[in-house]
Amino acid sequence: MRCFIAIKLSEHVKSKVFHEFENLQKKNLFRGKFVEKGNLHLTLKFLGSISEEEIEETKKKLSEIKFEKFNCKIGKTGVFDNESHIKVIWVDLISDKIEELQKQVSNKFLEYPSDFKKFNSHITTTRVKFIINKEKLIEEIKKINFKNLDFDVNEFVLMKSELTREGPKYKVLERFKLS
């Protein structure tokens, strides 16, 4: 079973972010796959394929994490790899507490390789397949602004990811409340 540990976004934030990227899609500047509104999240740790026994052990390890609730702000938009070679469009998730929580989670799972060199607190919104107008796309991405958009993080979750033809389907396996 493919699993990862994540912070889910509030419905209000998901709606605002998704709406901005719906508007970007209408500009017809590229072809790609938008992340479904319900699937928008921040990945703290990707575990990959794990067994039922490993899921139980994972739940136990995650329940040992003690962390206080905190607030996150939605920040600027950006791209991976870079503006010359755009593969992903993302949105910043800003809080001085996210990296600390991510380190605590990662330290519980040192046996799993890291899926990034350095943690980058971001929400993937789009996977780009083909660009029609790169200059205009970059210009439009930079215009996207989420002023005063924030939410409280009260929990993190263990998610199951099932890959289908229509895209990934996510299911929460367990919630871990923050104090």
Image (cartoon, grey):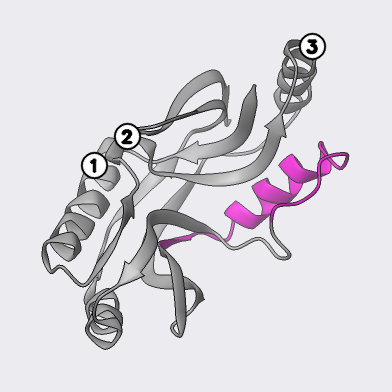
Name the amino acid type tagged 2.
Gly
> Is residue 111 highlighted in magenta?
yes
Q: CA separation, marks 3 and 1? A: 36 Å
Answer few, some or many: residues within 10 Å of disc 3's Cα (few below 14, many 20 plus, some between 14 and 19).
few
> Is residue 10 highlighted in magenta?
no
- Image position of 160 with respect to 52: above or below: below
Q: Is residue 69 left or right of residue 62?
A: left
* Farthest-out residue, right: 111
User: Which is in the foreground here, disc 3 or disc 1?
Assistant: 3
Q: Residue at x 33, y 38 (%)?
A: 10
Q: Which residues are magenta?
A: 90-115
Q: Which residue is mark 1?
A: 12
- The first of marks 2 and 3 along the sequence is 2
Q: CA separation, marks 2 and 1? A: 11 Å
Q: Which residue is mark 3?
A: 53
Quadrant containing the N terminus in the rendered view: top right
Looking at the rendered structure, the secondary structure element under dot 3 is helix
